[in-house]
Amino acid sequence: MDCKKDKNQKFCTCSYDPCSRKGVCCECLQYHLRSRELPGCCFPGAVEKTYDRSFEAFAKAWSL
């Protein structure tokens, strides 16, 4: 399967511009899970900009 990097970049909400994985979702997900984190696209915009990608930050961001 071919990577759809160009198409993915249009929807990527990661605000870390120098990221080499931007638009390559499979690499991004592997990278963050290895560090016990989630990618920026899993977070609301204001939380994503804090760069705290922890599971705890995810749970807090989405708790009602």
Image (cartoon, rainbow, N blue to C red):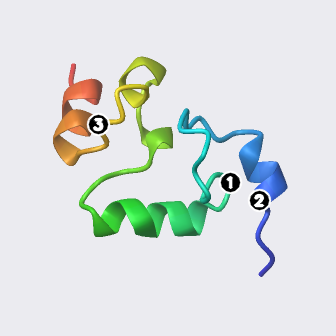
Task: State the residue lying farthest toward the bottom.
Answer: 1
Write down the residue under mark 3.
52
Residue 32 located left or right of residue 28: left
The residue type indicated by label 2 comes to Lys
- Amino acid, disc 1: Gly
Give me the C-alpha separation between circle 1 and circle 3: 20 Å
Disc sitting over residue 5 in the figure: 2
Look at the image and tell me in which quarter the N terminus lies: bottom right
Assess whether mark 1 and mark 2 are in contact (beta carbons under 8 angstroms). yes
Residue, x 56% and y 68% (percent of image)? Answer: 26
Tag 3–tag 2 contact (CB < 8 Å)? no
Q: Earlier in the sequence, mark 1 or mark 3?
A: 1
SS class of the residue under badge 3? loop
Q: Is residue 47 above or below residue 20?
A: above
Query: Label for residue 23?
Result: 1
Residue type, label 3: Asp
